[in-house]
Image (cartoon, helix red, strand yellow):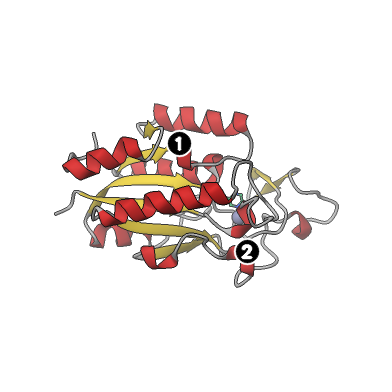
Amino acid sequence: MANKWGVIVIDVQGDFTTWKKGSLAVPGSNEAYVKSAEAATRQLKDLGVLIFGTQDWHPPDHVSFATSHPGKKPFETTTIGGKTEVLWPPHCIQGTENARVLIDNNLFLAIVKMSQDPAVESYSAFKDGKGIKTEMDPILQINGVENIILYGIATEYVVRATALDLVEAGYKVSVIEGLCRGVTSDTAAAALNEMRSKGIRLVAAPEDIIEEVRRGIPAP
Ligand code: VGL
Ligand code: ZN
């Protein structure tokens, strides 16, 4: 049975939300947003879908933090490992309150922690910035999951990078747009277009896919 449905809830953590006054709060990430993502996750789990999550989990001196680059401010760019990268306010520091996943942790079969290497910027929950794979792929494989439903934060960073790596690895991926939040509307819209152009299916709302799961129709 290698055609099961799975969900990957991306980085719904305090530091990315306005609800928890996070250091890198993205627009529209209020309590109502988190509760709607949680409700959809519970509904999908009740239909038998396997639920996985990701958790940005940085050491305090992570290379993506502006504070690690004297003279640099958050949202400026710099070169890391030969690539131009955005610098962030410190966020999702291992073990801190706002690094917690805000969705009921009992819903998850597993939560994959990411971006733990202090020297490496990583936006994909599938592999890090050096190309080293996380445990995501083996976890999906051991559970026979092939059709993946993705949503969370941030649209143009971890949602985008993870979705692109998953399709490249042969998974079928559907992104629920209404349950994603981006850093800016322009970059989020561009990321959604890029995902669509690379074979990722975009659906507007959880209802659009819940009915399909209920009827047992495999993703296209
Ligand atoms: C993310 C910026 C920095 C994300 C993580 O989860 O999309 N964005 N770290
Ligand atoms: Zn991060």
Locate ligand 2 by image quadrant.
Answer: bottom right
**If the image is split into quadrants, where does the N terminus sit?**
bottom left
Give me the C-alpha separation between circle 1 and circle 2: 24 Å
| Residue under numbered circle 1 | 177
- Can residue 36 be seen here? The reply is yes
User: Is 187 displayed left or right of 146 in the figure?
Assistant: right
Residue at the extreme right: 71
Q: Looking at the picture, does residue 43 appear above or below residue 117?
A: above
User: Residue 107 at what x, y percent from top left?
Assistant: 37, 63
Q: Residue at x 44, y 45 (%)?
A: 151
Q: Residue at x 40, y 39 (%)?
A: 175
User: Residue 220 at what x, y percent from top left?
Assistant: 23, 33
Q: Residue at x 60, y 69 (%)?
A: 94
Tell me if mark 1 has few (under 14), some (14-19) or many (20+) residues whose alpha carbon lies within 10 angstroms of its own.
some
User: Residue 68 at what x, y percent from top left?
Assistant: 75, 59
Q: Looking at the picture, does residue 189 appear above or below residue 171?
A: above
What amino acid is found at the position of numbered circle 2 in the picture? Asn
Q: Residue at x 67, y 54 (%)?
A: 64
User: Is 82 displayed left or right of 5 in the figure?
Assistant: right
User: Residue 29 at what x, y percent from top left?
Assistant: 59, 46
| Residue under numbered circle 2 | 98
What amino acid is found at the position of numbered circle 1 in the picture? Glu
Q: Earlier in the sequence, mark 1 or mark 2?
A: 2
User: Is 63 displayed left or right of 5 in the figure?
Assistant: right
On whether ligand 1 comes within 8 Å of the CB at mark 1, the answer is no
Q: Residue 57, labelled with which disc?
A: none
Q: Secondary structure at mark 1?
A: helix
Q: Looking at the picture, does residue 157 appear above or below residue 57?
A: above
Q: Secondary structure at mark 2?
A: helix
User: Is 35 displayed left or right of 90 in the figure?
Assistant: left
- Can residue 58 be seen here? The reply is no
